[in-house]
Amino acid sequence: MFTKARMTLTAWYLLIIMCISIAFSAVIYQVLTNEVERFATNQRIRIERRIQERMYFPNIPTQELHGQISLIDPDLVGETKRRISFMLIIINSTIFLVSGILGYILAGKTLKPIANMVDDQHRFISDASHELRTPLTAMKTSLEVGLRDSKLSTKETKKLINDTINQINYLQYLSDKLLKLMHLETNPIESTIKAVDMNFTIQQAVHQVLPIAKQKQIIITQKLMHEKIFGNAQELTDLFVILLDNAVKYSKRESQIAIIMEKRDKTIITNVIDEGVGIAKEDLPNIFERFYRGDIARTHNSSKGYGLGLAIAKKIVEAHHGTIAVDSTIQKGSTFQVAFRLI
């Protein structure tokens, strides 16, 4: 599809350039031929005047010279016009060839972001369809088996209903995350930014994550600063909820998570440090991709996820013109570092 589009766009580029080039060539040809004819006419007038003044052929009557000498060589004028036409054709042919090559390259660069976007959308739809199909298939299979079993007890029925509700909860979680990701990709936050206290934002995030941290007896320590950045308070809170939720999810029981802020020049850096299962080195470049879940110790954790949280976190950071990075060691823990420009 994009090969055809690239050729079409190249053809349009070439058509526009050649129309301009041919129009200029026509003007140049007209100007130059007029100049040649003007020069020939002036030359003829100058020679005639000198002949009349007896500067040329003083011993031959003027009347005889007019009949015997051609003051303008029509072949020379015609040859000059043909040479001008030939040179313009060569120039236009060169422009056509160079424009075709450059137009093809430019068309490729123009269409590349669109092609990447379409590929990204196709991959997103494919991944989302796969993730949705799994719980739907599980629910369908469980319900069909339950319906065929005429001896299904009340206890088994309740378990079947409970499992179905859990699958529905996962589907709701997935749909919410997909909507969140779509919202971040299609709606810029510039219109909702204001001065945000990073200390307050992180405190809000900790408050939301604290209940699940207490279930695993995980202690969250904080070393924060009252520094402000321009941003969307809710989006920033969601960012740190995602990072803290991941830290709790993949940390061992009775471990510790630390949130440490530091100021460097005009940048505020926040580190979320856990003592969890860690991330394999080969998976680090991909963890911010949608639906990515590496075949590492994290996948064997009892916690479930769809690989959307860190993709959303990255989108939030990018929307605030910040940076996010991760450093991790298997079975030792991970450090997620987020940096924003201060006001």
Image (spheres, rainbow, N blue to C red):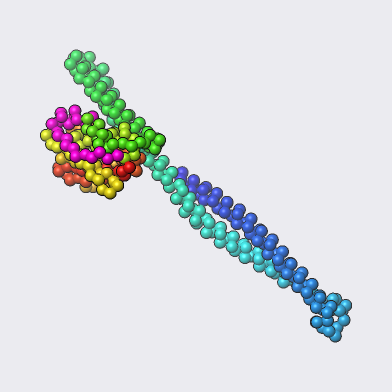
Name the residue located 24 percent from the left edge and 24 percent from the top edge: 166
Do we see residue 48 in this rendering?
Answer: yes
Q: Position of residue 43 (x, y in %)?
A: 75, 73
Q: What's drawn in magenta, residue-wise?
A: 208-228
The front one of 35 and 323 is 323
Q: Position of residue 50 (x, y in %)?
A: 80, 78
Q: Position of residue 191 (x, y in %)?
A: 40, 35
Q: Is residue 41 left or right of residue 312?
A: right
**Which residue sits furthest left?**
254
Q: Position of residue 330 (x, y in %)?
A: 17, 44
Name the residue located 25 percent from the left edge and 45 percent from the top edge: 263
Do we see residue 128 in this rendering?
Answer: no
- Report the number of numbered marks: 0
Quadrant assignment, res 337: top left
Q: Is residue 310 left or right of residue 30?
A: left
Q: Is residue 261 magenta?
A: no
Quadrant assignment, res 143: top left
Name the residue located 50 percent from the left edge and 49 percent from the top edge: 7
**Which residue sits furthest bottom?**
59
Q: Is residue 211 left or right of residue 186?
A: left
The front one of 260 and 70 is 260
Instruction: Answer above or below: position of 178 versus 36.
Output: above
Quadrant assignment, res 78: bottom right
Instruction: Answer above or below: position of 51 versus 151.
Output: below
The front one of 224 and 78 is 224
Q: Quadrant of the C terminus?
A: top left
Name the residue located 77 percent from the left edge and 69 percent from the top edge: 41
